Image (cartoon, rainbow, N blue to C red):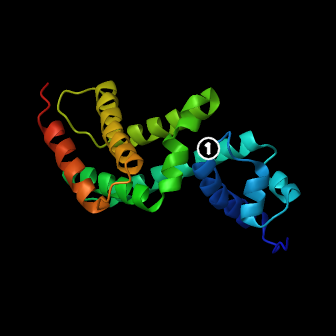
Amino acid sequence: MSERRLPAHERRRQLLDVAVGVFAAGGYHGSSMNQVAEAAGVTKPVLYQHFPSKRALYRDLVEDVGSRLEDAITKATAAAEGPRQQVEAGFRTYFAWVGNNRASFTVLFGGATRADDDFAATALRVESTIADAIAALIAVEGLDGEGRRVLAHGLVGIAESTSRHWLTHDLDLDPEVLATQAAELAWAGLRGIRR
């Protein structure tokens, strides 16, 4: 196996990028460090230099995938001009991310992550962080911070459960159309909230 020497941060990035495909295909329990090393074209000792165990690799992978999704949504909503545009930008970014990163979605929201308390806590932190970002965008008169957070979790749920159905049934959907429909549903719901 011939390994090209990469700086540590580039090698770590490469290993995470390869690991997402391995774990999405085989699940946490059905995948091994050997498979990740082989798919990355490195030896196991190189893999263990960056991740001391399969558990540490998977935990870091869930956190990495979650932060990438969160960053994409935060940037998209920050660039939007008003509340409705922010809702649309958030859904558009989310569904485009799912469409382009199916393996990442599977790792972040899949059964292996939810079945383990440690991994599930990481995924829940990601969901909460995204919900916190969305809650800051919800402007409903008379609604306090906790009320906005509850609604934000509902919006995260719309995106996650819609994506899960989309991928589970391998539906031929256009992420842009799906985002528009979900944004219209969410916006109509948010506009209909009364004190």
> Relative to 77, does residue 157 appear above or below in the rendering?
above
Residue in the image at 67% along x and 43% along y: 30
Position of residue 91 in the picture relative to residue 38 (left or right): left
Position of residue 178 in the picture relative to residue 78 (left or right): left
The number of discs equals 1
Residue in the image at 26% along x and 50% along y: 87
> Relative to 163, does residue 21 appear above or below in the rendering?
below
The answer to which quarter of the image holds residue 172 is: bottom left
Label 1, secondary structure: give it: loop
Position of residue 195 in the picture relative to residue 111 (left or right): left
On the question of residue 37 being in view, the answer is yes
> Relative to 137, does residue 75 appear above or below in the rendering?
below
Instruction: Estimate the x, y position of residue 8 in percent, counting from the top left.
Output: 78, 63
Q: Please name the amino acid that badge 1 sits on.
A: Gly
On the question of residue 83 being in view, the answer is no
Relative depth, front residue between 137 and 13: 13
**Local crowd at mark 1 within 10 Å, few (<14), some, or many (≥20)?**
some
Residue in the image at 13% along x and 42% along y: 188
Q: Residue furthest right?
A: 45
Quarter of the figure with the C terminus: top left
Quarter of the figure with the N terminus: bottom right
Instruction: Estimate the x, y position of residue 145 in percent, counting from the top left.
Output: 32, 28
Instruction: Estimate the x, y position of residue 165 in percent, counting from the top left.
Output: 35, 44
User: Mark 1 highlights which residue?
Assistant: 27
Instruction: Estimate the x, y position of residue 59 in percent, counting from the top left.
Output: 66, 41
Residue in the image at 67% along x and 61% along y: 13
